[in-house]
Image (spheres, helix red, strand yellow):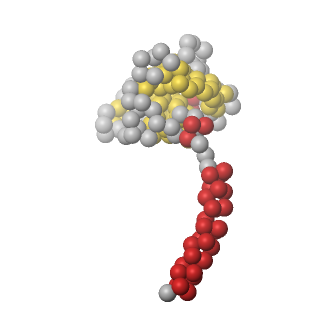
Amino acid sequence: MIEKLVSLKGLVLVAVVLLVPLFALGWLTREDPADKPYLRIVGGGFIFNYRVSDVYYGFTAIVQKPLPTGTIVEAEFEDPAGGTMHTVRQRIGGPEMAKFAMRSPSVRGVEAGKPYNVAIRVFDRDEKHLLWQDDMQFTSQVSDAVVPDAPLTVGPGYARNPNAGG
């Protein structure tokens, strides 16, 4: 009986000696959620839909830190044609919004190789406090000259547009 007790104490001592450094290592290398930004942009760029003669750009974001329900995300997209910034707003928050996308309205004047700015801001639900902001740029590899002035197709069946040239 005493031998079993001694071997049990030895086993517990060995387990503690092995687990304490592993726990300490894990604690030292952990990533504190408070240090993460609210959003992580995971993709984005320009979309050219030549069939319906539409060009826009946008991004996809992942929520990295919980946002209160009703949080407002605002994105300001540079107008490639030189006009005022296009502002797009979306209310998000809560556990069901882990990933979302935002896009500009239709744009024209996109030049290949030129960076276009996007400013992203996250406000509280009452828009009294700026919680987070970031700026980024998107560059297209082609100009919007590849997109016709009029849609090539019309309707749900992609019927040929009789008013489209070519």
The residue that appears at 52% across and 40% down in the rendered structure is: 64
The residue that appears at 45% across and 17% down in the rendered structure is: 127
Residue 124 appearing in the image: yes
**The one of 164 and 111 positioned closer to us in this rendering:** 111
Q: Position of residue 136 (x, y in %)?
A: 63, 29
**Count the marks: how many?**
0
Q: Position of residue 83 (x, y in %)?
A: 57, 13
Q: Quadrant of residue 23?
A: bottom right
**Left or right: 31, with 163 as reference point:** right
Q: Position of residue 22 (x, y in %)?
A: 63, 62
Furthest residue toward front? 2
Where 69 falls versus 29 (above or below)? above
Q: Quadrant of residue 85?
A: top right
**Left or right: 24, with 152 as reference point:** right
Q: Quadrant of residue 68?
A: top left
Q: Position of residue 61 (x, y in %)?
A: 51, 37
Furthest residue toward left? 156
Where 23 falls versus 158 (above or below)? below
Residue 164 appearing in the image: no
The residue that appears at 45% across and 32% down in the rendered structure is: 67
The residue that appears at 60% across and 14% down in the rendered structure is: 82
**The one of 94 and 80 positioned closer to us in this rendering:** 94
